[in-house]
Image: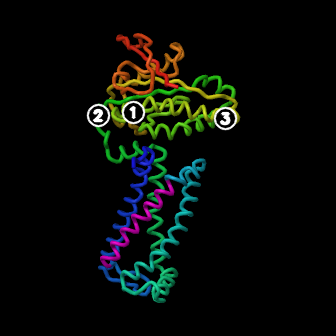
Amino acid sequence: MKISPKAIRNISRITPFAIIWLLSGWITDITEIGVTRNQNLNPDTDISLTIPVLIFASLANVLVGLIVGVLEVVYLEKRFSNRTLNAKLFYKFSIYLTLFVLIIVLLYPVAFTLETGISLLEADAWQKLGRFLISISFLTTLVHLSVRLMLCLMYSAISENLGHHVFLNFIHGKYHQPKIEKRIFMFLDMKSSTTIAETLGHIQYFKLLDTYYNMMSDHIINSFGEVYQYIGDEIVISWKPDKGISQANCIKCFFDIRDHLNEQKEVLFHEFGFEIGFKAGIHFGEVTIGEIGALKREIVFTGDVLNTTARIQSLCKELESDLLISGAMKELLPDSSYQYSSKGEIELKGRNKKEELFSVTQDE
């Protein structure tokens, strides 16, 4: 069974939660073993750290991390998207802490069984759980869990705001030194945005942009695209060549977004009073990628390909096309259901060499 791009992305976002829980759990266990010299100082309430218990604890940490990751990525991230960071942390922390207490109640007797060999059906297992829940050890456990939880929530907040791939690239230091790569870029710009902004006013126009970009997100993910920048009513999407060329994903992304907005045009018109359209330009070439900035670090693309793509997009209205691509881009694309119509060799502003442009339409 083929895994969808969105599922792959979600898995890559969920996995770090399991890693955070596993590593922080190991640190806690190793610290406890070092301090106590692996002696159970509170046998009435605590579980001895035997090898089976440590293995079980590691598996439990991975499971808890995965549960937190799934809840964050699939549900809570969207549920609290309109809340402030402080509110997000408070509500999520409360939900997770309640969940953790429930997990402790369920898993503590299992760990007791692994330590002693006594059946879960025996009263001793549940009596020890009761003593643990009113002990200082339980409070210490909650503190440890709270620290791990805050690490996860901070990771989630930073990843959500920077973008998952950007955050991981910062962590890995992938672009600490500038690198030259080939990339596909699409500059996608809303039609009549100035008129719409003037009519709606700042706040309502901002809400429109938020809705507009949210409607695009799944289609960008499904085409293996990455959002490079939001620039007012314009979005810049990037693909690694193999991902963007395969099945003409970069072209498919444009038409999938267009079709989805057409399906939602009545909803958008009812809420904002406008039918929303857009135009786009796509080009391919070499860029330099690296971290840049003194007061604020960002991963930035530089190169002629970005300027050229922006200029191609700016010609859409003049050439009466919603989607224009360069000749360099067309040469790479596989045969597909899309139709390409040459607009001739056009002299782009700031470039000495003319570029053949193609209008792209979709077979009905």
Callout 2 crowding tier (Cα within 10 Å): few <14, some 14–19, many ≥20: few
Tell me the residue at 37%/59% (across/down): 19
Crowd band around label 1 with a 10 angstrom C-alpha radius: few (<14), some (14–19), many (20+): some
Which class describes the residues within 10 Å of circle 3: few (<14), some (14-19), or many (20+)?
some
Q: Is residue 174 magenta?
A: no
Could you tell me the amino acid type at mark 3? Gln
Choose the circle earlier in sequence order: 3 or 1.
3
Cα separation between marks 3 and 1: 37 Å
Whether residue 3 can be seen here: yes
Numbered tag placed on residue 247 in the rendering: 1
Residue hosting label 2: 179
Residue 304 visible, this angle: no
Above or below, 252 relative to 329: below
64 inside magenta stretch: yes
Residues in magenta?
50-72
Residue where numbered disc 3 is placed:
204
Alpha-carbon distance for marks 3 and 2? 40 Å
Name the quadrant containing residue 276: top right
Mark with earlier residue (2, 1): 2
Circle 3/circle 2 CB separation < 8 Å: no
Q: Amino acid at mark 2?
A: Lys
Q: How many marks?
A: 3
Q: Position of residue 119 (x, y in %)?
A: 42, 86
Q: Position of residue 330 (x, y in %)?
A: 37, 22
